[in-house]
Amino acid sequence: MERGAFVGNIAEDLGLSTGEMSFRKFRLVSDDGRRVFKVNMGNGALVVNERIDREILCGRSAICSVSQDVEIDNPLEMHRVDVEILDINDNSPRFPKMRYTLQISEVTAAGARFPLESAQDADVGTNAVSSYEISTNKHFSLKTRTRSDGTKIAELMLENPLDREQLSMFHLILTAIDGGTPRRSSTAEMVITVLDVNDNAPVFDHQIYRVNALENLPENTLIITLNAVDLDQGTNGEVKYYLSSHVSQRVRELFSLNLATGQIRVQGSLDYEEEKVYQFDVEAVDSGTPALVGLAEVIVELVDVNDNGPEFKISSFFIEVSEDAASGTVIAKISATDRDSGENGQVRCQLSQNIPFKLQKSLNRQYNLIVSDTLNREISPYYNISVSAWDAGSPPLSTNKTIHISVSDINDNAPQFTQALYNVFLMENNAPGTSISDVTAFDPDMGKNSAVSRKRKPRLYRKFVTNHIHKSSKYDQL
C-alpha cells in the first residue's frame, strides 16, 4: 500500500468525534518508536505513514502484524491497535548457487535419494516456494517433502539404474516455483557425474531423532549421539557426519556435530522465547569414491526455564490527582507481562500497603490503578507507590517499579483564627490610627485557596473603633 492509503477509521471504532480527539489529546504510541501508521486528526482515519515491507518487519514469520497503542486523556484510556500485514508475491525464489555438481555411482540402486539445496523465498505462506521441477530425463525424478514448518525440501530420486559406459554425465535444469499469483520461479543447473563402485550408502539407526533440551544448557553440553552404519568394507564403510547443506546459519551457530563420533553438542546460547523447536537434516557420508550419503532428521525441542522476570508497562510514572477524586477513579494503566511460558509466564501484581490506592484487573495481564479511599492533601500531599510483580516459576522472579503521585489542592478548608476570642484593652486617649492588637488567621490549603482576606463584622461599638483599624496581608491591626 502506498503512503497515505486508508487502513481503517479508529475514531469511529472508539466512538470519538474529531473534536473529542483533539480535546482528549488523541495520540498513537509504538513500543519501538516506528511510525508505520499515523492518524488523520481531521477525520480519524488510520493511514499508511511509510513504505511497508513485510519481509523487513517480520522476516519468515507466518503471521505479521504491527501493534500500536492509542492513548487519550480526560479520562485516561489506552487501546491496542493491531494491523495485520498481508504478504504479496513480490519476491522470486532464489538458489544460493547457479550451478550444482553431483557425483553418483553407477551401481546406486533405483530409489536412492539425494538431497538438493533448497531455494529461498523471502515471501511466506502460499507465496513461498511450493514446488520443484527438473528437466525431462529417463533416469531422475524429483520428490518433494514438506516439513512441519511448511518448508519444501527437494530430493533427487534415481528412477532407473545408471550405466557409466553408456552415459557418464547429465546436465539438468532444476526449477523452484512459488505458489503466488502470478507464480514466480528461478532455475539452477545441475551437473551429475556417474562414477563406479561404492554401492552401499550409510544408514542411520533412526530416520528421525527427537531430543528435549533445557534452554539454559551450558555450552559443550552433549544432547544426542547419532549413529549410522555402512555395509561396505574398508574406506567405503567409514562414515563421517555432517549437517546438511540447507541447514540454516542460526542452527550452525547453536549446535555442533562431531564428524567422527556423531555427537551433537550445544555451542551457542539457546533461548526458548526466541525459538521453541529446531529441525535440521544430518548426513552420514562414507569415504568411498564417489561418497554415498545417508539422511536423517534431528528435532530438538527446547524446554522453558524461568529465566525472564516480569516486565511492566505503565502509562505514567509521575501522576497528579485531585484530592477530591472519587473512589474508583482510574489514574493510570498498568500491564505486566513475562516472556516465559506456562507457570513461568503467569504474573501477579501487588501495591504497597496502607495507601488510598489499589489495583483493579481490567484485561488479561492489565490493571487499572484506581483511587480506593479519601485523599487529603493537607495530610499526605505525595505518595511514592511501589508496584511489585512476580511470576509463578520456581524460584519466582520479580520486578518492582515506583510510581510518584502528587495530590493537587482543592479549597476544602475554611480560614481559622488563632483565637476564638480577642480581649483588647486600650487607653481612652489613643490617637486615631494607633495599633492596639494583632488578629491572625490562616488557611491550610495552598495557592489561591490559602489566600486570606478579612472583614470586620459590625458591632454596637463600631463607631468607637472604625477609624483605628489597619489591614495587612496576614493580619488586622487595631
Image (cartoon, rainbow, N blue to C red):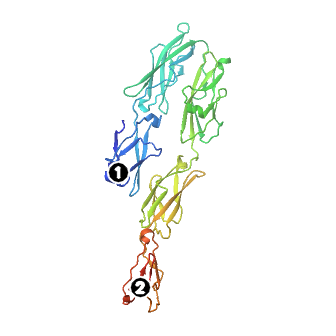
Tell me the SS state at disc 1: helix
Q: Residues within 10 Å of mark 2 (few under 14, many from 20)?
A: some
The residue at the far top in this view is: 165
> Taking the image as drawn, is residue 460 in sight?
yes
Q: Quadrant of residue 2?
A: top left
For residue 100, above or below residue 70: above
Look at label 1 and name its amino acid: Leu
92 horizontally vs 193: left or right: left
- Quadrant holding the N terminus: top left
Look at label 2 and name its amino acid: His
- Quadrant holding the C terminus: bottom left
Percent from the top left, x then y, of residue 286? 63, 20
Q: Which residue is mark 2?
A: 468
At a point 46% along the width and 13% down the height, the residue shown is 137
108 horizontally vs 416: left or right: right
Mark with earlier residue (2, 1): 1
Q: Nearer the viewer, residue 404 or 183?
A: 404
Q: Which residue is mark 1?
A: 14
